[in-house]
Amino acid sequence: MQLIYEKSEPGRRAIRWDVLDVPEAKLPEALCRSEAAALPEVAEIDVVRHFTHLSQRNVGIDDTFYPLGSCTMKYNPKIAEVTAAMPGMAQLHPHLSTAPVYQSAVQGAYEMIFALERDLAEIAGMKAASLQPIAGAHGELAGTLLMAAYHRDRGNTGKDTIIVPDSAHGTNPASAVMAGFKVVEVASDEDGTIHLDQFRAVMNDKVAGIMLTCPNTHGLFEKKVAEIAKIAHESGALLYYDGANLNAILGECRPGDLGFDVMHYNLHKTFATPHGMGGPGCGPVGVGERLLPYLPGPRVVQKDDGYALETPEKSIGRMASFFGNFLIAVRAYAYLRHYGDEGLRDISKMAVLNANYIWARLKPYYRPAFEGRFMHEAVFSAVPQAEKGVKAMDIAKALLDRGYHAPTVYFPLTVKECLMIEPTETESKETLDAFCDAMIEIAQLAESNPEAITSAPKTTPVSRLDEVKAARDLDCAYL
Amino acid sequence: MEVARGPFRNGRRKRCGAACEQEHPGELSFLGGGYYDHYVPAAVDALTGRSEFYTAYTPYQPECSQGTLQSIYEYQSAICRLTEMEYANASLYDGGTAVFEAAAMAVRVTGRSKVVVHPSMNPRHVELLHTHCANLPIEIVEGEDPTDAACVIAQNPDFIGTVRDLTALGDACHAAGALFVMTFYPVSLGILKTPGAMGADIAIAEGQSIGMPLGFGGPYLGILATRKKYVRKMPGRIAGATVDGEGRRGFVLTLQAREQHIRRSKAMSNICSNQALCALRALVHLSLLGKEGLREQAVICHSKAEYLKGQLGFAELLNDGPTFNEFAIRLPKSADDVIAALQPQGIHAGLPLSSLSTGDPMDLLIAVTEKHTREDLDRFAKALEEAACS
């Protein structure tokens, strides 16, 4: 398909401005660019067709089942889009919050922020939450900076290390390093949860915090979490909850009650805001009692005469220029109001049921990565298939030909030839059955005719792409 | 034939009759400070509202994500063309956090730990830089001396709207072995000298002004572009062109060994989710405006701001050089009082600089866009004079 730049014709245009109703002013030439930026010269219909065609070379949840493990690709209710587009939300200038003289113009936005932060804290058993972090990894960064501020404030010198399990998302160690910490990885036990003896072995006075995902990326609940919390707190370390998999436990248990001190939420996972091809997301940070005084500021607080801003006494400062990805938060707020507490409980139950249904149907054909039941995602190892020449990536490509998005493959790194399947609660039994049928057919073909799988995909707009060439002959812009 | 050009023309404040006005009062706003109420063509919402785009995730399976990947490649191309830089990433969160990412990148490239913040910078973005660096061995100093620094970070136009040629600052950075990081305002590059032409090593921007609604602070778009020699130190995702098994052009995420999902604790950044849909908005927006459209938009913004400036003789202009679409004035009385007086008239008079601790309580920052008509500007100038001089 052509690039928009290849469709450009000199002089063609989509926009005509009104005739200038004031005298034209000119800046000194030395301050100006020599030539206009070489943007496309196209008509509106050219742009509309170009991007419509591009969209047709994409697959979203609205097209098909999208069981991308750890990403919680659930259906995004349309009501949230309508709500976020309301002019009172979409057209609000952020600097109205900068000068208190404009405070009366933003009371509605403040009320939404206040209520959503309160709800998020309640859902996770935290004391408070801040919407400032812009994405999940940014929430992790906020959380690790909060831990640093806590230890600094208490004079806990030398606490320079954060423990991360080897099954953690790559963002955990990367965020800890960006916050100035050293990272120590701890291995998983054979049962797929954190190895307690190894954890004890790396636990010492230098440890500032431990980052856990629960359920973890193996799809398993970290059963030893209470013991880990006890060991951590006894040595003065803090416990961080990566909220990537919060969808599995809504209304069933709360990180705060399990002993976690700080966490982030992924509103684009648990609270159904669209993933937008990889963002914008929204990664609020939540804190328990210990970290409350350090929350990013300013915060929306409720006063007798309305809502206002206040910065906590020991705040780490601003994580965002304003209130994070506000219009994404609006969508999550609409979602919460739509479901309420009863609805949220059903969400987790169905998410876990759906994952276990897939596990039960596929386990005769694919090797489960661990013994026992999974929570919200079923994790398999395609090692038996790989031994016959069909790798996890081949299975992923064969699914594309059958009209599905692929599961997450090769993550977590702890599982060889990993297939990580997260169906979410929004899929019907019929959809799960049809997907399982496709997976079983692929498993059978891997035995009888591996070539039929390794040559996939054949029905997509392009076949397998040369990634080595892309990195070697770097071409990242059409100039 | 004569057909009236009504109030629905491009760029005008849309006034669709009394009922609509009632529903959302449609303030006449002069707030800027890095975030501007620019016209967004309807096709931007229509196209980016296609759920094949907004309900997809990160293009981990490139064969079924060519829409995403080609759009990122085209976006990267648009940013390079706009800035006259060589490489752009697929997006960062926003302009504020991009300052930190650029500083961290300069520290990686140079192995130095001092980051110099030029007085031209948005003070809010400097605040973010301090928060993000609180526990890192990075020293943040204010000024413009690049000696022993990883970089000097400067903004053009500066926070109160003054336009400069920063080429000499860039040269000084290079002589001292520091990188020159420049923050730009995308719409202004319709006419202003580019970061590339001024010698920037890293060009960053808040991309809100090219297709994003104001949305009370987000989602916005963090733009980052750089030189070829630094591309492997760049944070975030990058799409690259390649071919498939049949030799057809296709696109993939490339240079992924810089990223957290491969490199974990040794990654260039922790960024995972970025602002891909916002980058698509920017691409569609820039494609609709086109080469001439963006240039004209910049001329219109600048001309209208100059016209308003000419109507405000009663106040002292604080800029010490030419301005683009924003300027600061010192009023004869408190800016807060003047703002309060104008609010009942449905006018948001601008940003009091003292609220960002960067000016006197009488200082007001005023931004003008193509959406303001001459009548709007006349009405505002009159109201402002009445409130300020009464």
Image (cartoon, coloured by chain):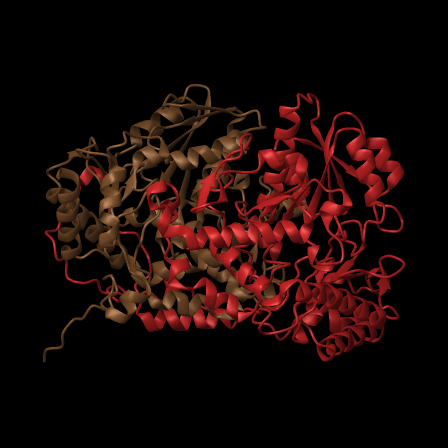
Chain colours: A red, B brown
Up the image or down, B377 lies above or below B163; here it is: below
Instruction: Choose top left, top right, bottom left or bottom right for residue A50.
Output: bottom left
Up the image or down, A148 lies above or below B302; here it is: above
B253 or A177: nearer the viewer? A177
Residue at screen point 48% across, 70% down = B50
Instruction: Say if residue A479 shows up in the picture.
Output: no
Instruction: Say if residue B202 shows up in the picture.
Output: yes
x then y, percent, for residue A374: 82, 60
Up the image or down, B231 lies above or below B41; here it is: above
A153 or B205: nearer the viewer? A153
A54 sits left or right of B211 in the view = right
Residue at screen point 53% across, 25% down = B138
Residue at screen point 85% across, 45% down = A224
A189 or B27: nearer the viewer? B27
Number of marks in picture:
0
A367 sits left or right of A327 in the view = right
Q: Residue extending furthest front? A: A304
A120 sits left or right of A113 in the view = right
x then y, percent, for residue A37: 30, 52
x then y, percent, for residue A284: 58, 48
Instruction: Choose top left, top right, bottom left or bottom right for residue A62.
Output: bottom right
Residue at screen point 79% across, 39% down = A229
x then y, percent, for residue B63: 60, 66
